[in-house]
Amino acid sequence: IDGLVVLMSLFTFYSAITSNLVFDQPILKGVLVSGKTYLPIISIFFLYYLFKTEKITMYQYNFAMLIICWVNLFLYIFLMFTINPAIYKESTDLVGFNPSKGGYVFNFPPSFIVYGLFFYFLDFTINKNRFSLILSFILIAYTLFLAKGRIQFVAVIGAIGLHTLWFLPVKSIIIRMLDILFITAIMLLIVYIIDEDLLMVVYNMFEVFAAAIFGFETGESSADARWIEIGTVLSYFDKHPGHWFFGIGFIPRDEMWLRFGYLYFTDIGIFGILFVFGIVGTILLFLFFLYPAFVIRRIKSFKYDLIFNTIITSVFYLLITSVFTGGFAFAPVSMLSIFMVLEYYKQKDDKIRKVKLLRQH
């Protein structure tokens, strides 16, 4: 894990060097710009040290994550119902405008809520805990009907689906689906009773999302703008084909807008990653997923451990979100925090294996 943190930190200098070669931007300036994204991952060393020295346990970590999940949920809901997001439309990235979502909406960080959602849902799939299923659907309802996070919802369902197919036999999946469909029906009925128009808002959200995915003009500025942004990237690569290989690196937002117009890397997902890091950097970044694949395949002692399976599902989530928003490439702390937990379980599994070998001899 130490080597992975160091390697990921080096992407600060990778992007600084490429922006220097492409735009003649001073390397130090490139380090400062990209360092806002990549240098904070060094803090992972400290958290990993706490695990390694057993200053904190995995159960304490999980408890803290769940507490933050529910605190975030209540805080976000309170802010949504007491503050008009349009007031802050010019001053923060936490507010966005989307007609299909009903106008101005808050874009609060979802990480802790997604973690809690995975934990409770897997407590149902692994331990058949129906109360946990209800808790997970509270978090799903927030994501879908209040936060109106289309990509978050698709990524969550995709990650849960991948884990379920990997973990459970077909017969168990069918049995679990009966409970899931029943809770889904209750959730939709409650939403219909409270505000039936909200169901149409969500339907319109995903209708626009599907149309945008297949390249149709939607009439929604945020969805159509993504294709314009992708066109900007592809047009740039057509004029500078050599930059396909190593990308353009990070440059300050105001300079980027002067050069390319309206363009957010996180809007265009995998195209944003390619634009910043090029084909070489993108391949190197995705190779990091070989580490969790190796650890998950190797570990046997914690196959039914709830926290371990929550982390596995989080890996699937990261992989899916990277396609739509750039995910881990623009928020590497989330990836390495997951890797840190996997490393903890790998070392624990190694110790158990050694004890078993000693007992056999």
Image (spheres, grey):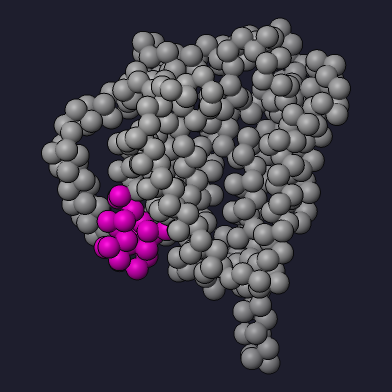
Magenta run includes residue 134: yes
In the rendered image, is residue 213 in sight?
no
Left/right of residue 112 with respect to residue 149 in the rendered view: right
Residue 176 location, x and y as percent?
Answer: 27, 58
Location of residue 18 with respect to 168 vertically, above or below: above
Quarter-wise, where is residue 279 in the image? top right
Quarter-wise, where is residue 209 in the image? top left
Q: Along the line of sight, which residue is nearer the eye, 93 or 12?
A: 93
Residue 235 location, x and y as percent?
Answer: 63, 9
- What residue is rendered at 67% in x and 59% in y? 47
- What residue is rendered at 62% in x and 79% in y? 352
Point out the stretch of residues depicted in magenta: 119-138
Quadrant assignment for the C terminus: bottom right
Left/right of residue 313 with respect to residue 101 in the rendered view: right
- What residue is rendered at 44% in x and 17% in y? 222
In the rendered image, is residue 199 in sight?
yes
Q: Along the line of sight, which residue is nearer the eye, 135 or 308?
A: 135
Residue 206 location, x and y as percent?
Answer: 32, 27
Quarter-wise, where is residue 83 in the image? top left
- What residue is rendered at 60% in x and 60% in y? 341
Location of residue 343 with respect to 103 vertically, above or below: below
- Predominant secondary structure, magenta span: helix
Residue 152 location, x and y as percent?
Answer: 43, 38
Q: Along the line of sight, which residue is nearer the eye, 284 or 6?
A: 6
Magenta run includes residue 118: no
Quadrant assignment for the N terminus: bottom right
